[in-house]
Amino acid sequence: MINVKIELTLLALLACVSSQVLAIPIFGQNLQELSVFSKEYTTTGADSSVYGSVMTGGVGTTGAGGGISGDFTAIGALTIGGISSTGEIATVGGDMTSGGALTTGDSSTVGGNITAGGAATVGASGAVSGNMASAGVVTTGAASQVGGNVEAGGAATVGVGASVVGTVSSVGIYTEDANSTPQTSAVITSNPVDAAALVASLINTVEGNKVQILAAQLAFSQMEATEDDLDATMIADTVLFSGVYQAPSLSTTAGITLTLDGQNKKDQYWVFNIGDILMMGAGSKIVMVNGANIDSVIWNAGGYTMLDLGASFLGTLLATKYVEVGANAKALGPGGSCGGLFSALSYVNTGDAAQIGGDGCRGIASGFHIDDRGVAYFQPTEIPEPATRIFFVTSIALLGFLLHRKKVNRTTAC
């Protein structure tokens, strides 16, 4: 009898390990590297901050003084503002890639390369650390600086007092102001950017991300609720422990605090499956206490999401429809993650001085996976490497054989 129990336990463990072998991370690599994704368009307000990268299936725009620490990518036109009324300068820390026209405002800075399927323009006193490549006309404004090469599928113009460290190559006419810093120029016969191929590649990536988000939303929605349903409106300060929560829709009144209490236990997580609308009132906030400091908070909204003025949101948001973030609101990620705002089918819009993610954050470090049934589960530790899994599974099978040679025709659930 003891041997039978041991064998059944081993078979159950083997089944669980086999199931985990088939599991995949809830977010693919592309999404893990993003802090904002929208299928339609993304607009961030003046003096707003996004820590991480942004991708949109439409046009992308940042207001004057807005900042994106990572890459900024759009299938459509891409525009970053100039200097705001507070004196802040618009900044993109990584690359800018647009399937259409690309424009940087006066005095703005780009820390990487610029690639555009249309015309590319750098504003007066603007700076680009890397290369510029455009399928159309390239223009660098007065006193601007380009730290690499400039390649234009049309005409290329370098403004008064501007400088290009590398070579300026163009299919069309090259015009250099007499007061600009001299640079090498060359005539090219083929367009440096295949606009059609660039757009097709961007569409493919955006569509892939959309499918991933919808799949993740479905996987989370299929998790069994472990706690009572939440009330439609949260009207008082509330403390919630680790678990899976659900509500048809959820809103909070202004100024309340939702506390996620980790109870000083390991591997705590929170999943909120909201059937339709998710809204946070003005000045309301979400905080984590007692060891709840890992990236393990998921908000899964089947409709749209609105974070009102000055609200402080915490976690990763997956919304099927649009996401609106009010002025001075924050959407942060637990621990060292950026959290993230993701709209599978619509847009993301943030108000002035809004903040997405925190300084030094690193993408989505989620511990959630999808099992072979398409259901999400939390696994904070990494799945063993294939060789380790094979050794582990083989060892279990061998141990089961040695302990009990007689076949037992029974199965045990995980």
Image (cartoon, rainbow, N blue to C red):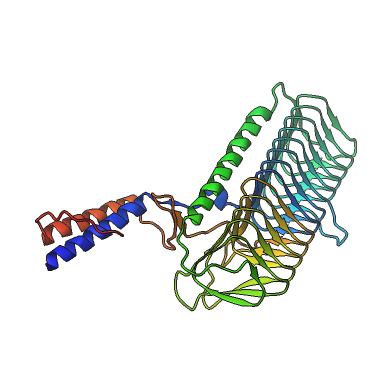
From the viewer's perspective, is 157 left or right of 230?
right
Frontmost residue, 340 versus 388: 340
For the image, the number of numbered tags is 0
Rendered residue at 44%/63% (across/down) = 380
From the viewer's perspective, is 292 left or right of 67?
left
Q: Is residue 388 something one can see in this rendering?
A: no
Q: Quadrant of the N terminus?
A: bottom left
Tell me the quarter of the picture where residue 97 sits.
top right
Q: Is residue 107 positioned above or below 162 on the image?
A: below
Rendered residue at 17%/56% (across/down) = 398
Tell me the quarter of the picture where residue 381 sits.
bottom left
Name of the residue lying farthest toward the top? 189
Q: Is residue 75 positioned above or below 45 on the image?
A: above
Frontmost residue, 60 versus 271: 271
Frontmost residue, 190 versus 194: 194
Q: Is residue 133 positioned above or below 370 on the image?
A: above
**Residue 352 percent coordinates (x, y):** 79, 59
Q: Quadrant of the C terminus?
A: bottom left
Q: Is residue 289 something one can see in this rendering?
A: yes
From the viewer's perspective, is 160 left or right of 280?
right
Name of the residue lying farthest toward the left? 406
**Residue 330 percent coordinates (x, y):** 70, 64
Rendered residue at 57%/44% (across/down) = 209
**Residue 203 percent coordinates (x, y):** 62, 36
Frontmost residue, 150 versus 294: 294
Q: Is residue 27 positioned above or below 281 on the image?
A: above
**Residue 202 percent coordinates (x, y):** 63, 37
